[in-house]
Each structure stands twice: as C-alpha cells, then as structure tokens.
Image: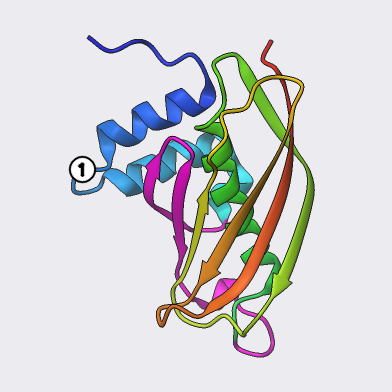
C-alpha cells in the first residue's frame, strides 16, 4: 500500500500516475489541474511526462495563442515555461513545503511555430526557507530551442 501524498507535488504525482496510462488520462489530469489553477488551465497545454523534479508540457499552435506575426505569443511561451517549472519544482519539494513564483525571466531565441514542448528538470530537493530556481527549455518540433524561461520560487512551510 502506498503512502498518502503529503504535499501538492505528491498529490500531482499520484494523480498523474493513476491517469497518465489511460486513454483520456492526460486530458483528465489537465482538467484536475485547471480546477486547482484556472489560469494555467486557460492556456490549453498538455502534460506529456511528469516525475519527481521532471516535467514535460506541450502547447499546440492555434489562433488563440498567436500574435500578429503568426507565431506563438511571447507571454503564452512564458506561461508554458512557468507551468513546466512549477510541476518540476512542486514535485521536488520535501513534504510540508509550498512555493510561489517571485520572479520570471524569458529569453527568446526563435519564432515559435507549431507544437512547442517545455522541459524542466530540477536535481535538488528543496525545503522551507529556501529559494528554488528552475529553467524550462522550450523547443519546436524540429528540436530548435525557441525560448528559455527561468523561474524563481520562494519556498515556505505549508499551513
């Protein structure tokens, strides 16, 4: 018998493990995330892979996320990268710790067109009182890096 999740990250991992192998599992997972974080759900992205400290999230290129140059809007890319860092950081936290983003920065390398994938890997396991920094690398279908999103997370004890 597995232990009950002790943190939001643990709950997310547990839910992902239960749903990801099912036919509509990733869609159901995003529905649950959208209920927890409505703004993130509005982006319309999809979690492709999730493990402790690791997240891969994708975004379809569609009219609703495009700019006037017919590429994906810069802020949609930031949102995608922030979501990937959030999943990676939250699933790497020690039980009883929560985090909030206190800084975001972006570097744009190429126009983002087509399906974009954001990958974030964090090696550390953080505890309350620390500051976590995570980087998401966003690539297009050809493997070209279109943006790099850096997020700073302030960590504290969960109530």
Crowding at label 1, few (<14), some or many (≥20) Cα neighbours within 10 Å? few
Residue drawn 44% across and 74% down? Answer: 115
Is residue 142 in the magenta section? no
Question: Is label 1 in a helix, a strand or a loop?
Answer: loop
- Across and down, in percent, residue 83 comes to 58, 49
- Across and down, in percent, residue 62 comes to 49, 76
Considering every residue shown, the one lying at the far right of the view is 102
Residue drawn 37% across and 40% down? Answer: 29
Q: Nearer the viewer, residue 75 or 151?
A: 151
Compared to residue 58, the image places residue 39 above or below, namely above
Q: Nearer the viewer, residue 19 or 119?
A: 119
Compared to residue 2, the image places residue 35 above or below, namely below
Q: Quadrant of the N terminus?
A: top left
- Across and down, in percent, residue 155 comes to 72, 27
Q: List the residue tagged with mark 1.
A: 21
The quadrant where residue 150 appears? bottom right
Region rendered in magenta: 43-70
The quadrant where residue 108 appears? bottom right
Compared to residue 159, the image places residue 25 above or below, namely below
């Amino acid at each position: 018998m597995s232990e009950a999740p002790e943190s939001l990250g643990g709950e997310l991992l547990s839910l992902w493990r239960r749903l990801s192998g099912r036919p509509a599992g990733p869609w159901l997972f995003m529905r649950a995330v959208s209920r927890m974080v409505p703004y993130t759900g509005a982006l319309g992205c999809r979690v492709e892979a999730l493990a402790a400290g690791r997240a891969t999230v994708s975004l379809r290129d569609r009219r609703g996320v495009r700019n006037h140059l017919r590429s994906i809007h810069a802020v949609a890319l930031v949102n995608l990268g922030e979501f990937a860092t959030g999943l990676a950081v939250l699933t790497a936290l020690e039980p009883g710790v929560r985090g909030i983003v206190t800084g975001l920065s972006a570097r744009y390398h190429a126009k983002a067109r087509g399906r974009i994938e954001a990958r974030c890997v964090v090696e550390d396991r953080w505890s309350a009182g620390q500051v976590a920094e995570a980087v998401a690398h966003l690539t297009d279908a050809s493997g070209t890096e279109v943006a790099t999103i850096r997020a700073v997370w302030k960590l504290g004890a969960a109530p």
